[in-house]
Image (cartoon, helix red, strand yellow):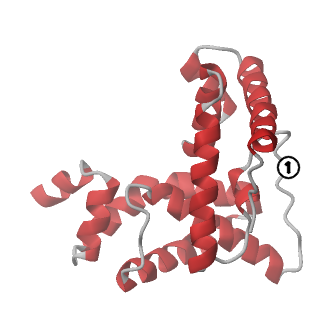
Amino acid sequence: MYMSVSLIKEKDSVLVKGYINGCERSLAVLIERHKLKIYNFIYSKVFDRDIAEDIFQDTFIKVIKTLRKGAYQEEGKFLPWVMRISHNLVIDHFRKSNRIPIFESKDEFDIFQIIGDDAPNIESNMIDRQVVEDLQKLIIELPDDQREVLTMRLYKDMSFKEIAETTGVSINTALGRMRYAVINIRKLIEEHQIVLSA
């Protein structure tokens, strides 16, 4: 019991190492901590609870296999890594059903679309990491208010209502800042001549 309480307070990176070293409870804590956000993300793409549940299960099967093989290299970035896996599995689902997913973002900046949807291999993982690093450098160049909204949306997966409440502005203002952030990121991509695909 004491161990469980202490595990709940641990960082993701510590729990990942714990699971790799044989502590099954560490993975249970990780799943419990992030399951709602991951499931909601999947459901927001497929709009079917049974399918979302299947993809959620497949996501953690893949997570477990990767961790057991010792192939996990996303130090300190467990949630974005799992979200990436779930996103790829959503794409696989649509491909298998011969349906093309339409991820309308209304001018929002979707990092997953920029990185691409191909199944990860060593080469694409290297490219992905470079793309993410390039994007992070561009995001730093944004004005504070735009960077704040973009970071909350991309990395914390917050809704615009949540962003508005957190930053103390209206939803329209939050949307406006996101829109300008997207416009400015696109300009920076052109100015720096960054190629965001293989």
With 24 as the anchor, is 156 left or right in this view?
right
Image quadrant occupied by the C terminus: bottom right
Q: Quadrant of residue 129?
A: bottom right
Q: Is residue 53 above or below residue 174?
A: below
Picture residue at 26% right of the left edge, 59% below the top: 14
- Considering only vertical position in the picture, is 108 above or below 178? below
In this view, the residue farthest toward the front is: 192
> As drawn, is 96 to the left or to the right of 23?
right
Rendered image quadrant of residue 151: top right
* Residue 118 or residue 160, whichever sits in front: 118
Find residue 108 and report its horizontal and vertical position in percent. Answer: 78, 40
Q: Position of residue 167 (x, y in %)?
A: 57, 19
Q: Position of residue 142 (x, y in %)?
A: 65, 28
Residue depicted at 62% across the width and 63% down the height: 128
Query: How many numbered dots are placed on residues in this image?
Result: 1
The residue nearer to you, when weighing 61 against 181, is 181
Q: Please indicate, yes or no, whether residue 174 appears anywhere in the rendered image.
A: yes
Whether 162 is drawn above or below 95: the answer is above
Q: Which residue is mark 1?
A: 104
Q: Is residue 18 left or right of residue 42?
A: left
Seen at 87% across and 58% down, the residue is 102
Provide the secondary structure element on which disc 1 rests.
loop
* Few, some or many residues within 10 Å of mark 1 (<14, 14–19, 20+): few
Q: Residue at x 71, y 23 (%)?
A: 174
Image quarter for residue 2? bottom left
Q: Camera-side residue: 72 or 188?
A: 188
Residue 47 showing in the rendered view = no
Q: Amino acid at mark 1?
A: Glu
The quadrant the N terminus occupies is: bottom left
